[in-house]
Amino acid sequence: MPKQSPLQRPEAFATTLGAWFATHAKDYPWRRTTDPYAILVSEMMLQQTQIPTVLGRGYYTRWMERFPNVQTLAQAEEAEVLRTWEGLGYYRRARFLQQMARTVMERHGGAFPEKLEDIHALPGVGRYTAGAVMSFAYDRAAPIVDGNVARVLARLCDDATPVDSTEGQAKLWERAELLVQAAPSARAHNSALMELGQTVCRVSSPTCGQCPVQEYCLAKEPASLPVKGARATVTEVTERVFFQRTEEGVLLQQETGARRTGLWKLPALPEVEQLPAVLHKSRYTITRYRVTLWVHEAPPARKGKPLQQEKAARVIPHDDLANLPMPSPYRRALNALLAETAFRLEA
Ligand code: SF4
């Protein structure tokens, strides 16, 4: 008898998947709570960061200790919010969380909304995140489609429609909705689909022999799925900044661009005829940019002169450096430079 996909037997599929999850669920702090705020925090952190980083380096725990509810987050200084987020990157997420907290305070009197449309209307909350809060916090039958769920569904249905196309997305959300509607617990079902993608139906080496839902899976060549559209090309970018340190502190500049507003960095190197000596070089990647960060000595006109104010720049005392929010590549560069120059302060 030919196999039947989960779409043909959604209740049976949900029962089989649920039974597997009951004995294989990983223990994460956000699975021990039904607090929608805590779940939203975890979802925002996990949007662009892996679970081992969020948990292993203590970001989630630190955040929840410092901002245990929307009230504390709404009232916090932005600099402290960004400093607590530092290391996770994509700082827009931290700002969205604070905007979300303030919106919940102002629009909902401090009580987290329970309707899908109200959650979806919060700053930074898209369809996936709204579905995650609805299902994980309130156990309501809202679908979620992230990378793991998309891969599992594409394989189960043996569907080669590009998952990042409009048509592919429409199919995925429709299928996820049909399946979650048939599940006895939306919380367990959505968690199970994600976990199946993380641990069994993995990107390059799915372990189909150990898969609890193999009897529903139509994939002929699982590793070839899901199909994705053309990748965005990576652009090489050069950033040149300078390092000037005195006994009072280090000259830093506050960012004003959309992506990193409020964060501090070494000041941009002004136009000079000849580039000053390089003190530090590193590379990092952000979205589709591969950045080479060059840290130079201060330009000659500045050496030995009082520190002039760059745009939005000031000398930060050494004791305050650790408390300023700073993008990780700059934090690493600054720490390396401070260690190197600890015994040779500028005159
Ligand atoms: S049988 Fe293989 S391809 Fe199909 S869902 Fe399970 S792990 Fe994924």
Image (cartoon, helix red, strand yellow):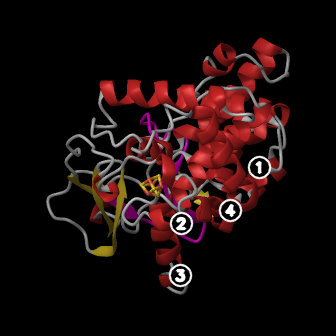
Residue at 51% x, 79% y is: 345
Q: Is residue 340 above or below residue 300?
A: below
Q: Is residue 22 in the magenta section?
A: no
Residue 328, given in percent of the width and then of the height, sits at: 50, 60
Q: Is residue 347 visible?
A: no
Residue 145's disc number: none
Disc 2 marks which residue? 210
Residue at mark 2: C-beta within 8 A of ligand 1: yes
Disc 3 marks which residue? 339
Q: Is residue 237 visible?
A: yes
Which span of residues is magenta-colored? Answer: 239-266
Task: Judge by depth and name the residue closer to the eye, 25 or 61.
Answer: 25
Q: Is residue 206 above or below residue 38?
A: below
* Comes first in the chain, label 1 or label 2: 1
Q: Amino acid at mark 1?
A: Arg
Q: Is residue 260 left or right of residue 248?
A: left
* Comes first in the chain, label 3 or label 4: 4
How far apart are the alpha carbons under marks 3 and 1? 41 Å
Disc 4 marks which residue? 55
Disc 1 marks which residue? 31
Residue extending furthest toward the left: 273
Quadrant placement of the N terminus? top left
Q: Amino acid at mark 2?
A: Gln
Q: Nearer the viewer, mark 3 or mark 4?
A: 4
Q: Quadrant of residue 99?
A: top right
Q: Nearer the viewer, mark 1 or mark 2?
A: 2
